[in-house]
Image (cartoon, rainbow, N blue to C red):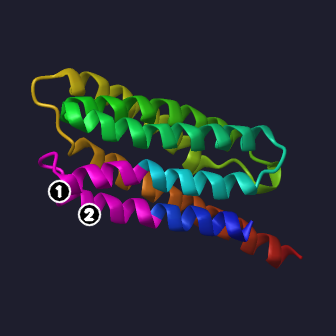
Amino acid sequence: MPSLLRIYLVRGLIAIAWAAGFSAVSDSLTAATVVLLISYPLIDVVASLLDAREDPGTPARRLQIFNTALSALTALALGLAAISGIGAVLFTFGVWAIVSGVAQFTVAIRRSPELGRQWPMLIAGALSVIAGATYLPAALGDEPSLGMLIVYTAAGGIFFVLQAASLAWRQRRRVVQV
């Protein structure tokens, strides 16, 4: 469990830092913006692979592997979408948010009982689906904005940090009981 705690904590802090950095370049679709957009799902690839190691042979692991492949494809798709503009990028990010949110929600439900219900991950997965669904019509609107992604990624980071704190609390409680 300590490694899962570290994965969640580092993943959360990176997402918060990414949101802060992205806020400085999100006004237009520059090379820096595209690099950050592509890097975000790649961060998820690494975190998902590390997370999958924690669940060998379980349904949660299979979903993590699926999410790894999905995030890798999303990185590629975001790079290609950037050629078409902000609307295409936002639409691509929205589809990814919906599908990965469903996977995240499902993984949190299927985690082993000793980890307890992962409420921050359940909430984050559900909110990812909702956020992704709002990106789709926004992407098709007259003035799509990448600024929407800042709140989404920062909030996702906060939920990962909260999940790490929850795991740390459970771990400490288990040590005290022994």
Could you say where residue 39 lies in the image, as x and y percent from the top left?
39, 54
Position of residue 33 in the picture relative to residue 175 (left or right): left
Residue 110 appears in the picture as rendered: no
Q: Are marks 1 and 2 in contact (CB under 8 Å)?
A: yes
Residue in front for this viewpoint, 29 or 114: 29
Q: Is residue 29 above or below residue 172?
A: above
Residue beneath disc 2: 21
Residue beneath disc 1: 25
Position of residue 7 in the picture relative to residue 26 (left or right): right
Q: Is residue 30 magenta?
A: yes
Say which element carries label 1.
loop
Q: Quadrant of residue 97?
A: top left
Tell me the residue at 73%/39% (across/down).
62
Could you say where residue 40 lies in the image, as x and y percent from the top left?
40, 52
Say which element carries label 2.
helix
Residue in front for this viewpoint, 162 or 45: 45
Residue numbers of the magenta segment: 13-40
* Cα gap from disc 1 to disc 2, whole angstroms: 7 Å
Tell me the residue at 44%/34% (across/down).
96
Tell me the residue at 32%/49% (across/down).
37
Q: Quadrant of residue 89?
A: top left
Q: Is residue 22 magenta?
A: yes
Residue 126 appears in the picture as rendered: yes
Tell me the residue at 41%/28% (across/down).
95
How crowded pointer 1 is (Cα within 10 Å; few <14, some 14-19, many 20+) is rated as some
Could you say where residue 10 lies in the image, as x and y percent from the top left?
52, 68
Hey, what amino acid is under mark 2? Gly
Marker disc for residue 170 = none
Residue in front for this viewpoint, 77 or 116: 77
